[in-house]
Amino acid sequence: MTHIVIGDFCVFKHGDKVRIGQVLQFAKLGRKGKGQKAVISSYKSSYAPVESDFGIICTWYDEIEEIHGSYKMKQSDATYYPLDTYICTLTTSSFMQHESGKNIIPFESSLFVPPTDGILTLTKQSCDYIKHVDSTIIIQEEESASEPNKTAKLWVKLGKAFVLTDKEKFIITGGKKLNDLHVTAANIILKGMFPNLNGLQTSNCQYKRPLENSANAIQIIHIEGDHWAVISSLNCDVNEVNYYDSIYSDLPATAEEIILKLFPEESGHNGIKVNVIACPKQNGATDCGLYAIAFCTSLCHNIDPVTILYAQDEMRLHLVESIEKKKLEPFPIKRKRRVTSPVQTSKLICLCPSCSKGEGEELTLWVQCEQCHKWFHDSCVPIYDRNEKWLCEICLK
């Protein structure tokens, strides 16, 4: 979920007018009877989620018609505007000092230059982004008593049956966390572009169906904490996969479970080695799905994600345009990266539920429980009679 913080410079859509506001204060909004939304309680926190139940007071900047990209400060009023008018947050590097076009701050810079003499000027890149988002933003309507189940409008159709609606588009342009529909759309597009690659199946199958062919496979997976990551066997040795994660530096437990389900044959015998790759990390908590699609796209195009730093502020626009074109090109990059080692850590995992073997052990003998049908390493279970049916300790209870 997207949040904004007091002091942020944000872009809002009020009617047909785009305004920039520096956030001063929040309040909780609600209805009294059948009337319009009004303040029902104060909200003392320094940040708030972008939801229609919250309102803000800002110092407003309205665009100067004669000077494109320049905004002049207006007097603040006491009206709380609902946060569902929010379009995006401007990074501090979006601003330029207004001195007759001089002292331009490069977009890549992390420096912040406050508005000068009440005038705020944006870089061309910021103006283009706002223009694009403004043209695609879905203004959230109030619920209609006559049409309580009003259906969303079609945005894109992929293949014969898969569709994305304007709701999915708003999630991308509104800075929200991507869901399985966005990931499936990316999989469909990439599968059409790279038919010789394996994997790229819907995340709904990750616990149900192994990959039909695990060689040269790429798969976006959904793990604990509503998080997205990528596994790949491209350029890997036998019984080895790479794990790409834009947040975690260790292998989460649910990622282990999914890998074992997707690569059951490789997970047997000597186990499967998982390399946690030192890939670029995201800023914030909402872009893991975006980065997972970016990693997957780079790998499909034979680009190592370790070697690049993505331009995070351009990635959502790129994804929208790519879905509309039904073609996923590599995501915009900010610069190249140099890392000492592409692998942060490696871990050996296997199917055996009670396995305590470490990396390097020879694990070749297996026994299957006759009741639950799970496989165990022969050396991990108590001594048993090989001529009789065997039940694991759980099924014996």
Image: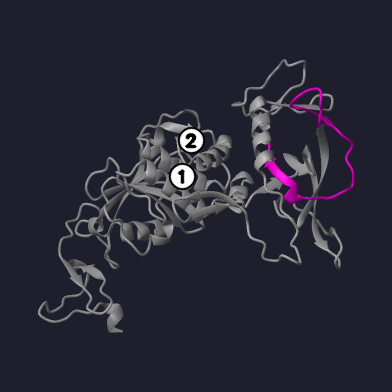
Q: Which residue is mark 2?
A: 331
Q: Is residue 86 magenta?
A: yes
For the C terminus, the image quarter is bottom left
Disc 2 from disc 1: Cα separation: 9 Å
The residue under the point 49% across, 43% down is 291
Q: Is label 2 in a helix, a strand or a loop?
A: loop
To which quarter of the image does residue 221 belong? bottom left
Residue 386 in the image: state x and y as whole percent: 11, 77
Residue 42 in the image: state x and y as whole percent: 83, 57
Colour mapping: one colour
Question: In the rendered structure, which amino acid carries the disc numbered 1?
Answer: Ile
Judge whether 387 appears above or below 126 on screen: below
The residue under the point 65% across, 39% down is 133
Residue at the outermost left position: 387
Question: In the rendered structure, which amino acid carries the disc numbered 2?
Answer: Phe
The reply to whether residue 77 is in sight is yes
| Side of 157 where 303 appears, left or right | left
Q: Is label 1 in a helix, a strand or a loop?
A: helix
Q: Which residue is mark 1?
A: 293
Residue 47 in the image: state x and y as whole percent: 72, 49
The residue under the point 12% across, 79% down is 385
Q: Within 10 angstroms of label 1, few (less than 14), some, or many (20 or more) residues?
A: many
Q: Within 10 angstroms of label 2, few (less than 14), some, or many (20 or more) residues?
A: many
The residue under the point 25% across, 53% down is 359
Magenta region: 63-91
For the residue pair 150 and 95, the one nearer the viewer reads as 150
Q: Is residue 220 magenta?
A: no
